[in-house]
Image (tube, rainbow, N blue to C red):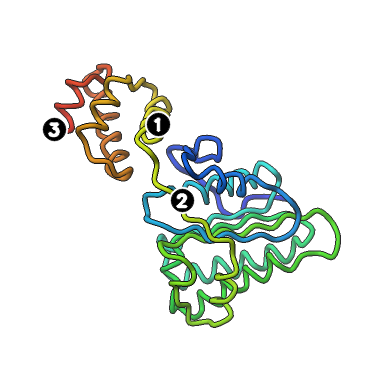
Amino acid sequence: MSRQEVLAIEVAHQPTLTNYVAGANTELVSALQDSHSGFCGYWIFGDDVCGKTHLLRATCLAGAEGGHLNAYVDCAAQSPNRVADTLLALASTVRDGMDFSATVAVDHVSHLSQQRQAEEALMAVYNALSELPPQGSTVRRLLVAHRHSAGQTAFALPDLNSRMRSLAHHRPQELSDADKGLLLRQRAEQSGYHLSEAVLEYWLRRGPRGMDRLLADLARLDQATLEHKRLLTVPLLKSVLGY
């Protein structure tokens, strides 16, 4: 059986652990970069704009680069029945490749809560990953993302509750203004233009502070620089964003 990605990852900005602006989350990033043998599981929780999806996709990408079987499953993008089918197929694939390393990320797992078939499929994935061969250096990783901790989450399947609560819990911390500026500058450079210190200072002082709004506004500014064929200046930011 050849090593291959189970699901492709296609995003405009390829998320990696290197381009994740860690801020106060260096311990979490270090844990996800650790490739010690055996099974390890992570429950990553917090608001939808705290970078959970970036971390899940980036860890899958790192696994792929390391030759892992890997999959990123977004429970919000499919029906629970479709997710159940995907997870069951994934569990079978992991078991068939018992001597291979594997990284599996399950995002927006709240969409599976109280969906018995989907919960049983997630349990099957957990079991497949944790059933390691007796010897060797196989690495098995499971990442699950939710808005709340597993202790605040009620699955219909009692065994799934206990397994998910046993995972290492991490809550990404909000970025400082300096780290938000670093992230915005990084994204702008990926789009081919420079965000000056003057623009960043004005933007973060006058505009909204949430990363979801900042990234949405950055997309508007991207478009404006293309349409007007101008560098991003404070006057252009004012005209596009209105502050």
Counting from the top left corner in percent of width and height, residue 64 is at: 64, 46
- Residue ranking furthest to the top: 230
Q: Quadrant of residue 223?
A: top left
Tag in front: 3 or 2 = 2
Between 151 and 20, which is closer to the camera in this rendering?
151
Q: Earlier in the sequence, mark 3 or mark 1?
A: 1
Please tell me which residue is depicted at 68% across the width and 63% down the height of the picture.
93
Q: Quadrant of the N terminus?
A: bottom right
- In the drawing, what numbered circle is on residue 172? 2
Q: Mark 1: which amino acid?
A: Arg
Please tell me which residue is depicted at 62% across the width and 61% down the height of the picture.
41
Q: Earlier in the sequence, mark 3 or mark 2?
A: 2
Between 76 and 204, which is closer to the camera in this rendering?
204
Q: Mark 2: which amino acid?
A: Pro
- In the drawing, what numbered circle is on residue 187? 1
Q: Are marks 2 and 1 in contact (CB under 8 Å)?
A: no
- In the picture of the structure, the residue carrying the numbered disc 3 is 242
Q: Mark 3: which amino acid?
A: Gly
